[in-house]
Image (cartoon, rainbow, N blue to C red):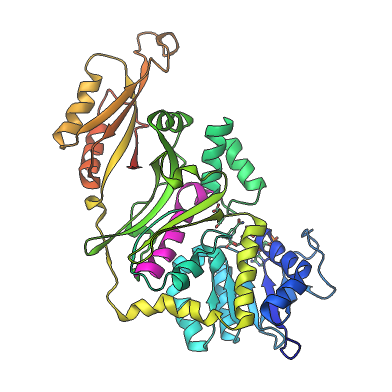
Amino acid sequence: MADLQPLRVAIVGLGTVGSGVAKILLENSQHIARRSGREIDVVFAIVRDPTKPRGVTLPDGVLATSFELMESPEIDVVCELIGGTTTAGDVVRQALNAGKHVVTANKALLCEQGDELFQLAREKGKTICFEAAVAGGVPVIEGLSQSLAANQIQSIEAIVNGTSNFILTEMLDHQSSYEDAVARAQEKGYAEADPTMDVDGTDAAQKLTILAQLAFGTKASLNDFPRQGIDKLKLADLKYADELGYRVKLLAVAKRNGDFLELHTQPTLIHDNLPMAAIYDAYNMIEIEGDAVGKTWFSGMGAGQMPTASAVVSDLIDLAVGRAQQTFPLLDLWGQSEPLRILPAEKIERRYYLRFHAIDQPGTISSIATILGNHEISIASCIQHEFEIHPADSGEGKASIVPFVVITHTTTEGQMRAADEELIQCDAIEPDYLRLPIQD
Ligand code: NAP
Ligand code: HSE
């Protein structure tokens, strides 16, 4: 250990994750040096505003504002922890061009520009490590790309957005309003700078594209598969699901379906007896099924300062030890064989939860059933409670509105989409009709 030079790091972006990385590297330096066989030194922490409190005490001379410092011969690795895709992309390119390895937690960047950046890394003979980009502190990238490398992966089903899972837990278990739950997720440092990316399903879908490429070699972009967030759910939906024996989770799925890859990211009713249903708060779970190993489950904190920083530092330790080179070629390895093609969304087969706010008048249920029947969608069960809005509150002469929930038998996304077009035109139904898939 004494003979090896320290690994010298520039952290770019000292927000939630960057400050956590600096804290671990400074506070656990001796432990890390023992595990790495050499020291890992923070040489520069590059920020926009050097006067802003960072929650970490850095040695003199470390805090800096110039991106030029990334190119210094005193630096071996750049940790890009800014987020977003514009400046962050420039930082990664500048670092690689200057001959530095890169560690990033930025799934948005890898999803959008991964091909170009990994190509550049290969040309420069450098590594991009990204354990923190999927599921925060959970070591799923290493698990998938190294520990399960013997397997042909059959499926990945994953809760990979901590913010959404936290919001869904807060709403159902603590009766929080949606808005309060979003604000708490932001306070706790789980949410993206723009939390829209968390709640509209974008963040989970970006992570799914990374997992799908690692597992199946399929390069998907966000418009290639169904993506829906938790932002249209109401507390009542979580309660109806609970009544039916399900928990609603934002579920990202990539699975072999014949010669195709089925991909989607949607809030899904997960049966109570499945392990995924028990994942609460900002915890993530990734279920990976391999042909040899069977099902494996990776679970832990998927967001937040220290869990995410733990994953970033583990990448730095891999670089210090010299075993990190293995991670990036895997993304490209698949280029040599035929990757699975994405299954057209219309062909995805599942059961569905349909929630209507329907006008409480003769014939409403028969209109819904007729539309579903016309598209050969069979009803497995339904719930209708007493009126949600009392006639006295709905305005003179107006009928009351009742929630009406239908569970279908297995049908295709294509049949459901065709039925949706008629359902949203139906006068007996309010426009806030919601459809979610079911996982039994
Ligand atoms: P954050 O708290 O918003 O921190 C971002 C940092 O980058 C801030 O320090 C910000 O500076 C700095 N920054 C932004 N634009 C910059 C620019 N143009 N030049 C210099 N610095 C700039 O974000 P975060 O939560 O730490 O997330 C960082 C990355 O980790 C993102 O890619 C995110 O997706 C990923 N990630 C986050 C989590 C999590 O739980 N938070 C988990 C996994 C992955 P100021 O401080 O001056 O504003
Ligand atoms: N905003 C992300 C989440 C951070 O909530 O999961 C982890 O990538």
**Identity of the residue furthest to the front in this view:** 293
Residue appearing at x 67%, y 58% in the figure: 306
What quarter of the picture does the N terminus occupy? bottom right
What quarter of the picture does the C terminus occupy? top left
Q: Which residues are magenta?
A: 195-216
**Identity of the residue furthest to the right in this view:** 60
**Identity of the residue furthest to the bottom in this view:** 3
Query: Is 336 left, or right, of 63 in this rendering?
Result: left
| Most common secondary structure along the magenta stretch | helix
Question: Is 365 situated above or below 18?
Answer: above
Residue 321, x across and y down, in percent: 62, 82
Q: Is residue 177 visible?
A: no
User: Which quarter of the picture shows residue 256?
Assistant: bottom left
Image quarter for ligand 2: bottom right
User: Which quarter of the picture shows residue 410?
Assistant: top left
Pick whichever, 190 or 159, lies toward us.
Answer: 159
Query: Is 83 left, or right, of 21 in this rendering?
Result: left
* Residue 205 counted in the magenta span: yes
Residue appearing at x 66%, y 61% in the figure: 17
